[in-house]
Image: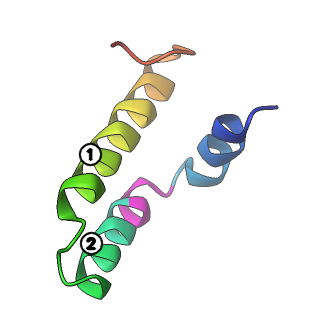
């Protein structure tokens, strides 16, 4: 099982909390890494959407 599969399993059903995690990082770093955090949050949303559609790989 890959690391991404483990993360997907942990996040399934907790999508909203995962988004809040990025906001927490932004707050703690005073927005210093907001671009990277936003990118990570978008990739996470895309990955969660692909799980909902039953696809193994997200569209690129």
Residue 48 place in picture, x, y as percent: 44, 36
* Region rendered in magenta: 14-18
Query: Of label 1 and label 2, which has the lower sequence position?
Result: 2
Question: Looking at the picture, does residue 8 appear above or below residue 57?
Answer: below
Label 2, secondary structure: give it. Answer: helix
Q: Position of residue 12 (x, y in %)?
A: 56, 47
Q: Nearer the viewer, residue 59 or 26?
A: 26
**Dominant secondary-structure state across the stretch colored magenta:** helix
How crowded pointer 2 is (Cα within 10 Å; few <14, some 14-19, many 20+) is rated as some
Residue at image point 33% right, 13% down: 60
Give the percent coordinates (x, y) of residue 21. 39, 70
Question: Which dot marks residue 10?
Answer: none
| Image-based side of 41 in relation to 30, left or right | right
Q: Is residue 5 left or right of residue 53?
A: right
Give the total number of marks visible in the rendering.
2
Between 22 and 32, the one nearer to me in the picture:
32
Is-magenta flag for residue 16? yes
Residue 50 in the image: state x and y as whole percent.
43, 23
Residue identified by numbered label 2: 23
Residue, disc 1: 39
Where is the N terminus found, in terms of image quarters?
A: top right
Residues at discs 1 and 2 in contact (Cβ within 8 Å): no
Membership of 38 in magenta stretch: no
Between 8 and 35, the one nearer to me in the picture: 35
Q: Residue at x 50, y 27 (%)?
A: 51
Q: Left or right: 38 with respect to 57?
A: left
| Mark 1 surroundings within 10 Å by alpha-carbon count, few (fewer than 14), some (14 through 19), many (20 or more) | few
């Amino acid at each position: 099982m890959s690391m991404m599969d483990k993360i997907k399993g942990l996040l399934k059903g907790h999508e909203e909390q995962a988004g809040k995690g990025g906001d927490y990082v932004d707050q703690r770093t005073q927005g210093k890494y907001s671009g990277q955090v936003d990118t990570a949050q978008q990739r996470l949303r895309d990955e969660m959407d692909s799980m909902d559609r039953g696809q193994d790989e997200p569209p690129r």
